[in-house]
Image (cartoon, rainbow, N blue to C red):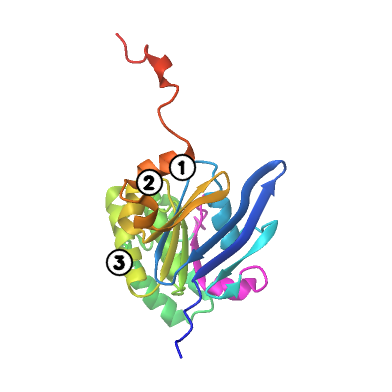
């Protein structure tokens, strides 16, 4: 008898959310395979952040459901949160803690033993290039340092699934390379990453699978090579999002001297 295929790391069905008259997400279905690097892309206002917030338990949907590592996010919220790490948009950290204290707080909040938190925290600070800033207050961290310490906090309890909303936005190239290396090592050992991004080059470099979200709906999804069909992902994205150069004919004055 053939073994049953493993359940998806993330499974979303009929997810929907309105804010007054505005439909932010209109019935999203997604399957994210275990051990994959999954990219959620779309233009501004497409519903990427709202979708990730609902799937990661930060925002209650109007309808639909989401499962993370087999656990219903809204029926079993505490168990679901044990199985995920989250780096949300609009990063908010306890700024009067040092980086090391922030990791200690996060680990103890997750129920990890103090010695394990200390060991893992030191390793993460080292790998992410923050050892020298470990005793520095987070309020004094740069944007890149904040992203890295927040990623360390999300990884500390070794969750099977990691949700990242624009993790490379406003991050310098050195920090971005470090974050990429850590995430690739994580997925290489069986972890699953779901990230939103509007940087197509980054998605092409990192992701195995991709979903394109436009107007709160998934308009294309599947393996990266299948979605782009031999074309640059940016071209496919622009076409699906309805973008282009139309209307620029009237800008003949621009740049003229």
Q: Is residue 47 above or below residue 255?
A: below
The spot of residue 88 in percent (x, y) is 51, 56
Q: At 41% from the left edge and 55% from the top edge, which residue is drawn?
A: 147
In the displayed structure image, the side of residue 60 where residue 47 appears, left or right: left
Residue 127: give its label. 3
Calculate the distance from the C-alpha at mark 3 to the C-alpha at mark 1. Answer: 38 Å
Query: Residue 183 versus residue 32: which sits nearer the camera?
Result: 32
Q: At 40% from the left edge and 27% from the top edge, which residue is drawn?
A: 245
> Could you say which quadrant of the image residue 251 lies in?
top left
Calculate the distance from the C-alpha at mark 1 to the C-alpha at mark 2. Answer: 15 Å
CB within 8 Å, label 1 to label 2: no
In primary-sequence order, the first of circles 2 and 3 is 3
Q: At 65% from the left edge and 74% from the top edge, which residue is drawn?
A: 76
> Are there few (<14), some (14-19), or many (20+) residues within 10 Å of tag 1?
some
Note whether residue 99 is visible. no
Q: Check disc 2 and report the residue beneath it.
A: 199
Single out the residue that lies furthest toward the top: 257
The C terminus sits in image quarter: top left
Residue 240: give its label. 1
Local secondary structure at mark 1: helix
In this rendering, the label closer to the viewer, 3 or 1: 1
Residue bounds of the magenta highlight: 73-96
In this rendering, the label closer to the viewer, 1 or 2: 1
Q: Is residue 23 above or below residue 37?
A: above
In primary-sequence order, the first of circles 3 and 1 is 3
């Amino acid at each position: 008898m053939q073994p049953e295929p493993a359940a998806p790391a993330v499974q979303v069905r009929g997810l929907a959310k309105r804010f007054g008259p505005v439909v932010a997400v209109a019935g999203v279905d997604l399957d994210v395979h275990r051990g994959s690097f999954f990219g959620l892309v779309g233009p501004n206002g497409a519903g990427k952040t709202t979708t990730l917030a609902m799937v990661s338990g930060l925002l209650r949907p109007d309808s639909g459901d989401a499962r993370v590592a087999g656990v219903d996010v809204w029926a079993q919220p505490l168990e679901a949160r044990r199985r995920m790490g989250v780096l949300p948009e609009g990063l908010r950290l306890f700024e009067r803690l040092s980086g090391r204290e922030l990791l200690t707080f996060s680990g103890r909040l997750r129920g990890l033993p103090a010695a394990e938190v200390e060991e893992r925290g030191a390793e993460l600070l080292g790998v992410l290039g923050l050892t020298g800033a470990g005793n520095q207050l987070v309020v004094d961290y740069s944007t890149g340092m904040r992203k890295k310490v927040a990623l360390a906090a999300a990884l500390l309890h070794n969750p099977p699934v990691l949700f990242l909303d624009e993790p490379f936005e406003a991050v310098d190239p050195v920090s971005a390379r470090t974050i990429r290396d850590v995430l690739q090592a994580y997925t290489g050992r069986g972890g699953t990453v779901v990230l939103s991004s509007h940087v197509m080059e980054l998605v092409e470099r990192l992701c195995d699978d991709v979903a394109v979200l436009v107007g709160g709906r998934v308009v294309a999804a599947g393996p990266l090579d299948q979605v782009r069909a031999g074309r640059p992902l940016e071209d496919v994205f622009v076409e699906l999002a309805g973008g282009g150069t139309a209307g620029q004919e009237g800008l003949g004055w621009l740049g003229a001297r």
